[in-house]
Amino acid sequence: MTTLSVWKFETAEGAQETLSRLLDMQKQQLIQINDAAVVSWPAGKKRPRTDNYGSMVGRGMVSGAFWGMLFGLIFFVPLFGMAVGATMGAFTGKFQDYGINDSFINKVRQEVSEGTSALFLLTSSAVRDRIAKEFKGVSVELIHSNLSKEEEATLMEEFGTN
């Protein structure tokens, strides 16, 4: 099963630092990172910076279009107003096909703000207790949405890389 997870950090650098740690854990076979993206929002900036790292294991699970549309929906639609919001509203329904609902989008939008960062991951084969142990004492909030096999297949069909 593939898991889409969002890890929120109280610093603009926390997501990038954690991705580095998770890549080390991947070498230990504690997790498989299929795709990753980082959102960092330094204090004083009007909007966040987004970086799509793509596949960490070879061929990417999803394309940059997936991350771009998701980040646009979460972070940029509120800045553009109702006209663009109505157009992007159609995408909201499409993301539900991937197990990403309005509640998930709204929670991420509320939690990831100026001065914070977030790590977006598509992972599988995680040894959760070992990963939790590695991050004991780290200030992080985990928001996640598990994708069913059907949702994963739909995601791959529509956003998968070639």
Image: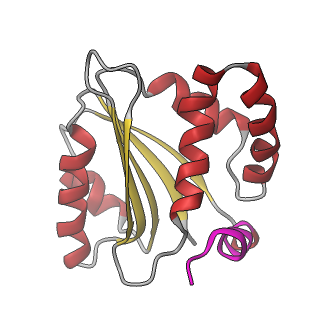
Residue 125 on image: x %, y %: 43, 74
* 49 relative to 65, above or below: above
Q: What's the image's color scheme?
A: secondary structure
Q: Residue visible at 70% across and 54% down?
A: 99
* Left or right of residue 34, residue 131 in this image: left
Q: Quadrant of residue 103?
A: top right
Q: For the stretch drawn in magenta, what is the main secondary structure?
A: helix
Query: Which one is nearer the viewer's eye here, 18 or 81?
Result: 81
Q: Residue furthest top?
A: 44
Q: Quadrant of residue 81?
A: top right
* 7 relative to 159, above or below: above
* 14 relative to 114, above or below: below
Residue 128 on image: x %, y %: 37, 61
Q: Residue visible at 57% across and 84% down?
A: 162
Instruction: Give yes or no for residue 101 being in the magenta stretch.
Output: no
Residue 107 on image: x %, y %: 57, 29
Query: Which one is nearer the viewer's eye here, 35 or 69?
Result: 69
Q: Quadrant of the N terminus?
A: bottom right
Q: Quadrant of residue 19?
A: bottom left
Residue 109 on image: x %, y %: 54, 28
* Left or right of residue 29, residue 84 in this image: right
Count all numbered tags in the image, as a single digit.
0
Magenta span: 151-162
